[in-house]
Image: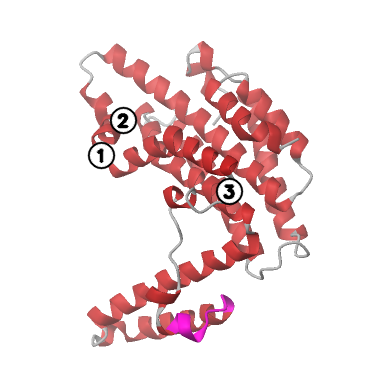
Amino acid sequence: MNDNFFNSIPKEKTLNHKVIGPKINKLIEFFINKIDREFPHDRIRNKNAKGMFLTFAYVAKNTYRSVLFLCDMVSKDPGRKIEYSISSIPLLRVILEEVFTMLFFSEKLDERITWYHKAGWRETKETYDRCLARYGEDENWASWFEKYRKHLNETTSMFGITSAEASNPRKNVHVWPTPGQMKKRVDSPNVTNFMQYLQDWFYKTFSQAAHLSWPGLAIMGGHFLHANLDNQESYLKKTRSDCAFYNTTLILAFFSELENILKFNHKEELKYLWTIVSEHWEVTKELYDKRYRSLLQ
């Protein structure tokens, strides 16, 4: 998102990128560096936790910047079209999935981090078994199977897979829950209610866009049918604006959840950024008031 990006957005949505952009980039790098160099092993004892949290942070950073790239339609590159910003909607779901995951982790950290990795091992094993059943007799696959078996053996040890889990993953290793399933498993009514709010007002729309159900198809492609070009341009500018603000809001939510878990004493900077963005978009303010205003006290 460059400095001219917000100039093309209707005035009621205008936010000066010089105020917010560099600070969010600094926030992201702060957390990545902290996780890498000062991970709280004394509180989070799972040996796989550091690498997992660091990867989540990098995925959030990459997704956030990808959305900004798609939404920046002021580039001198003539190939950059305003409608490309709509393709960022399914990407917003990636950051939202991370918010759900951090919420779910936060109640029972070590237990759920262990579950996360074991569920991942199960998926990997099922992929191996499916390929083995179909291509096990094909010599062209022999090298692939050898490397995959080595990977499975390494992760079996790394993730603490028991002999019973290894012999029957479908029975003895639970799958990782979807966001809709997570809210049924959390203990806190406040977290349950917040997850329901996220599902109703964020996840549902992003998922429709990703799955291309009828509402999602309308979101992702309805603008192509606008007979009135003025209406089409207005719709695309509004959508681009919303995507940029959703992106900023969700990245703040993700790192607020990370701060809640890792406790890097970075609440004041997060509160400042929430306050700035909340002044320009009601959705951000509502999300902040729902959880993060009190969480960051």
Q: Amino acid at mark 1?
A: Ser
In percent of the image, x 33 and y 79: which residue is there? 129
Question: Marks 3/1: CA distance?
Answer: 27 Å
Question: Marks 1/2: CA distance?
Answer: 10 Å
- What is the x, y in percent for residue 257? 64, 45
N-terminal-most mark, 3 or 1: 3
Taking the image as shown, residue 41 lies to the left or right of residue 132, namely: right
Q: Is residue 162 magenta?
A: yes
Category of crowding for the residue at label 1, using alpha-carbon neighbours closer than 10 angstroms: few (below 14), some (14–19), many (at least 20) = few
Taking the image as shown, residue 182 lies to the left or right of residue 187, namely: left
Q: Nearer the viewer, residue 75 or 234?
A: 234
Picture disc at residue 219: 2
Which quarter shows the N terminus? Answer: top right
- What is the x, y in percent for residue 27? 69, 41
- For label 3, the residue is 103
Which quarter shows the C terminus? Answer: top right
N-terminal-most mark, 2 or 3: 3
Residue 74 visible to an observer of this rendering: no
Residue 238 visible to an observer of this rendering: yes
N-terminal-most mark, 1 or 2: 1
Which one is in front in this view, the residue at disc 3 or the one at disc 1? Answer: 3
Q: Which residues are magenta?
A: 158-166
Question: Marks 2/3: CA distance?
Answer: 28 Å
Q: Amino acid at mark 2?
A: Ile
In percent of the image, x 52 and y 80: which residue is there? 156
Picture disc at residue 213: 1
Q: Which SS class for mark 1?
A: loop
